[in-house]
Amino acid sequence: MKKIAVVTGGCGFIGSHMVEYLISKNYFIHIIDDMSVGTLKNLKHLNSKCFKIFKRDIVSMNFEPSIFKNAKYVFHFAGKGDIVPSINVPEKYINVNVNGTLSILKNSVKYKIKKFIYAASSSCYGIPNKYPTNENAEISPQYPYALSKYMGEQLVLHWARVYKLKCNSIRIFNAYGLR
């Protein structure tokens, strides 16, 4: 049986790079993306026989065995980004970045995912007093986006303790590059 991994936001900037990497390691990828930001152009250079795209909203996902069954890893990169728009519509950011993360966590526990990796955000530090910022710096989210990503991170760490889901949370600073 081929190794399977789930990548949420797999058509986006960071997610598409993870899809590419996992394919190079002989994984078959189940991509969950609502295509609100991600694009198929980010995957056009890859062998389409190595992945399947599930166009889904992570907030309203029910338990879907076709996506999670037999998967070993979940890489959760889906979310609503951007600081300034989050000030105008904070409920959208809280809904996607918190409730969407909860939905993916529930699926991960139900289908006994071996490891869950979460893309958190360095925005949880606010405007730091010291650069480079140490991961032990004070948490001070100043915008709804930052708060929602930090709340998602706390959910992930809570699931690790309560449900024994092996998790890593990666606080990404500035992602840039091709695509």
Image: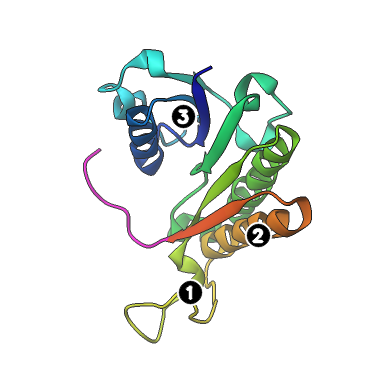
Q: Main secondary structure of the magenta part?
A: loop
> Mark 1 sits on what residue?
125
Q: Position of residue 142 (x, y in %)?
A: 52, 73
Is 65 situated left or right of 41 in this image? Answer: right
Magenta stretch bounds? 172-179
Q: Amino acid at mark 2?
A: Leu
Q: Amino acid at mark 3?
A: Met
Who comes first in sequence, dot 2 or dot 1? 1
Q: Quarter of the image holding residue 17?
A: top left
> Where, quadrant-wise, is the C terminus in this rendering?
top left
> Mark 2 sits on what residue?
157
Residue 107 lies within the magenta run: no
From the image, state whether disc 2 or disc 1 is nearer to you: 2
> Mark 3 sits on what residue?
35
- 174 vs 126: above or below: above
- Disc 3 on helix, strand or loop? loop
- Disc 2 on helix, strand or loop? helix
Q: Position of residue 120 (x, y in %)?
A: 50, 57
Mark 2 and mark 1 in contact? Answer it, CB < 8 Å: no
- Disc 1 on helix, strand or loop? helix
